[in-house]
Image (cartoon, rainbow, N blue to C red):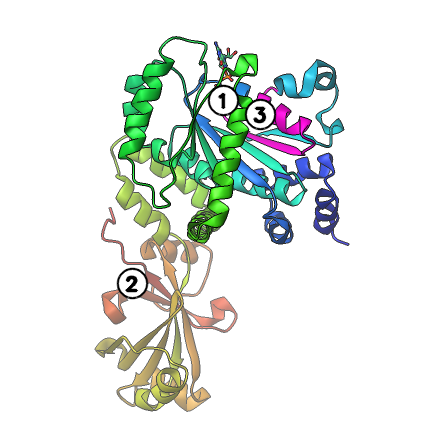
Amino acid sequence: MSAVEDLTERLLKGEPRAIARAISKVENGTEDAPELMKAVFPQTGNALIVGITGSPGAGKSSLVDKLALFYKDEGEKIGIVCVDPTSPFSGGAILGDRIRMQTLGLDKNVFIRSMATRGNLGGLSRATVDAVAILDAAGFDKIIVETVGVGQDEVEIVKTADVSVVVLVPGMGDDIQAIKAGIMEIGDVFVINKADREGVLRTEKELEALLSLAHRPDFWNPPIVKTVATENKGIEDLSKAIESYNDFQKQGRISLTRRTDIARWRLLELLREKLLTDLLSKNGTNAKLDNLALEIAEKRNNPYSAVEEIINSIMKINHLGIATKEIDEALKFWQDALGLENVHTEEVAEQKVRVAMLPIGETKIELLEPTSEDSPIAKFLEKRGGGIHHIAVEVENIEASLSKLKAEGARLIDEKPRVGAEGCLIAFVHPAATGGVLLELVQSKNESKK
Ligand SMILES: Nc1nc2c(ncn2[C@@H]2O[C@H](COP(=O)(O)OP(=O)(O)O)[C@@H](O)[C@H]2O)c(=O)[nH]1
Ligand SMILES: [Mg+2]
């Protein structure tokens, strides 16, 4: 059994240590995290996921604490995920002082985790949603996710919850206006916490007025619950409001649409992260990132050109050159039978060849047909018959590549670049240098070249 399989097995049994390790894996984006999540995903879908969001200091953590305690007393297993770098979740009353002193792993019915805002690739919302999935698979009945209601990431996280609770406090009339555009429309349940303070009624009226203007696709009327988290007041009402939306949602057809939207978001989020990680893991790209950032800060460059530079600096195979007696004959296979598209045909007089370019993935097949008897392709065909004639590698700066190769003692056919197909600068490296393959260097097209 592999280490990940073992970990998965233990987390599915609800072992706190295994759960903690699994969450760390998705948080750090370790190499085996995808394998883990593939095993976890089919086991999800049983928990009720409650998102709790609101401004810093609104009393979210206090509410989560009391709500979790309430659920725990009902005999349920509770997972808590806190995404608030400004005030990580302390555990408060739910753990009680006695348990808090000991390791967290002791109470199998409560699991608390603060997510770190780690990594410069973003991915916090993805990691949070993965952490929730792990808790779901581990058998927790209720999973509460606390986020500060600012920023797109946070909104996305809350959107993935089954029930989203937005926490407000009395006397934030202006705030309500300000956050209207952001989190108002994601609230399935609204809480006016700190209801022991003045202005509760006014805030409630303002909120009602705003909600009456909103048009929800599911026609749900979000209830407003008043709580005093510090005094444990209104918590049962809150749990009922959460339950009522959950029941409502289960009956409606909208729920599949919502789940599909969430799945789509997760997919894009994961894809974005994966592509970015792959890109930055390419040779020297990370170092380049720092240099370019400095250049931009010093106004010597701009982000748009810098992005092009990063993408163009990645070495890739520009094309594979295949020698053929007649392009039209070869196209019967490459185009008609295999299904590639011939997007470009031209005659390169200098080389005495006619070429056809057929894109395939990120690269191209270049069919080469001699246009005269003394064409290099004609000689190649005569000697070796048709087949792979050369490999073309894309370089950022062909002059620089040539002088580096020369300095390394590689035998060059062209010491100076010349113009090849599609107007690109090219140069050939002798097969003697490469272990028997004719190599073409192609300078990637970069308008912003300084
Ligand atoms: N008066 C009053 N204070 C509260 C209430 N709920 C929370 N607080 C206090 O508000 C402060 C911020 O609470 P916290 O739960 O950390 O807010 P969060 O940043 O939204 O998680 C703390 O000092 C709490 O004791 C409440 O209902 N009434
Ligand atoms: Mg908090």
Residue 299 lies, in percent from the top left, at 25, 32
Mark 1 and mark 3 lie on one chain; the one further toward the N terminus is: 1
Q: Is residue 445 above or below residue 44?
A: below
Mark 2 is on which residue type?
Pro
Residue 86 visible: yes
Q: Quadrant of the N terminus?
A: bottom right
Which residue is painted at 27% across and 77% down in the image? 351
Q: Secondary structure at mark 3?
A: helix
What's under tag 3, amino acid-wise? Leu
Q: Which mark is residue 60?
A: 1
Pointer 1 local density, CA inside 10 Å: few below 14, some 14–19, many at least 20: many
The quarter holding residue 55 reads top left
Q: CA distance from mark 3 to mark 2?
A: 71 Å
The reply to whether residue 375 is in sight is: no
Question: Magenta stretch: residue 62 in it?
Answer: no
What is the three-letter code of the residue carrying label 1? Lys
Earlier residue among tags 3 and 2: 3
Evaluate if marks 1 and 3 touch, with contact meaning CB atoms under 8 Å apart. Answer: no
Magenta stretch: give its range.
Answer: 66-90
Q: Is mark 1 within 8 Å of ligand 1?
A: yes
Residue 19: % across, % down = 68, 38
Q: Nearer the viewer, residue 271 or 165?
A: 165
Q: Is residue 144 above or below residue 133?
A: above
Q: Which residue was labeled with disc 2?
A: 417
The residue where tag 3 is placed is 67
Marks counted in the figure total 3
Q: Secondary structure at mark 2?
A: loop
**Rendering quarter of residue 304:** top left
> What residue is drawn where x is 29% and y is 79%?
355
Mark 1 or 2 closer to N-term?
Answer: 1
